[in-house]
Amino acid sequence: MNELQSLFGQWLEEEGRAAKTVESYVGDVKGFNEFLMDKGNDSDEPLTRFSFVRFKQHLIEIGLAVTTINKKINSLKVYNDFLEKRGLVSESFIQLKRDRVQVAAGSEHVVSALSEEEVERFLFFLEDRAKVTQRNRLIGYLLLYTGLRVSELVSVKLMDIDNLTAVLTVKGKGGKIREISLRQDVLQLIKQYMQGERQQSNFADSEYLLVSQRSPKMHRDAVRDWLANCSDELKMKLHPHLFRHTFATRLLRKGVDLTTVSKLAGHSTINMTAKFYIQTTRQEKQDAVDKL
């Protein structure tokens, strides 16, 4: 397989493909071959319709983004062309129009959200004390588990947090008030930050939860800048609103009703929530049927 991958790379170069493109295509084919090896595949055929379909399903099951899956499908289609021209397979097993993962019609408003794998990577990154401060770790958890807008996040005051009932009171758009229940791990991080790193700040007596070295209230641009640095570290694009989308999307995936999600997100109407997130659940249903 390694020799075939090398020949594929050489063929791409001969076809005039850019170096980055060659690297990407060969990398995707390598991932496909590793999948086959993990499954104990001992077929002499480097690619079959069956192996492609199972690999595609595997990509869907591990929660990769549709664009990522379709990129890999495109790479395998080019690989299929290479194998066919070399006489190593007898036909084209992949048709892009048929095999690319489709987004449901009318889903222009489908939002981007982190996959479960990406959430897990982010959480493990937050555990690295050498790279992440107590404050930034708390920010990560608040974004992930409350769905706060970045303006709401930096405006959280100490008086907004009820440790007894584990409730955060948020003043959202238009002055609307909503309550968000806090997980115990989030409450614990708030406590650790309050008793630790925050005490070392020049603004330890600030009424706001999140403070900086220069201000009693953290600026939202500082949150964006930190997430940009995380993006470089984790090789995935992170921004505050992505976590808000992820919060709502994960709730829906876990079966939480639309009304509750709407209230937690602070949307003005349920229709607004449905407009942006219901297509996600439709895609989930399609994926479920495709698993059969």
Image (cartoon, rainbow, N blue to C red):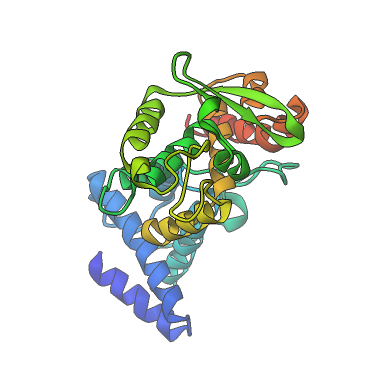
Residue placed most toward the observer, 280 or 16: 280
Q: Look at 54% across and 54% down and name the residue there.
A: 67
Residue placed most toward the observer, 118 or 80: 118
Q: How many labels does the image show?
A: 0
Q: Vertically, is 126 above or below 274?
A: below
Residue placed most toward the observer, 37 or 133: 133
Residue 6: where, in percent of width, then height?
29, 74
Residue 146: where, in percent of width, then height?
53, 31
Image quadrant in which the N terminus is located: bottom left
Residue 121: where, in percent of width, then height?
35, 45
Q: Is residue 262 left or right of residue 249?
A: right
Q: Vertically, is 158 above or below 143?
A: above
Residue 276 visible somewhere in the drawing? yes
Q: Look at 55% across and 43% down and name the residue there.
A: 154
Q: Is residue 63 left or right of residue 66?
A: left
Q: Look at 47% across and 54% down and name the residue there.
A: 227
Q: Look at 42% across and 41% down and name the residue there.
A: 204
Residue placed most toward the observer, 46 or 269: 269
Residue 177: where, in percent of width, then height?
68, 25
Residue 91 visible somewhere in the drawing? no
Q: Vertically, is 265 above or below 107?
A: above
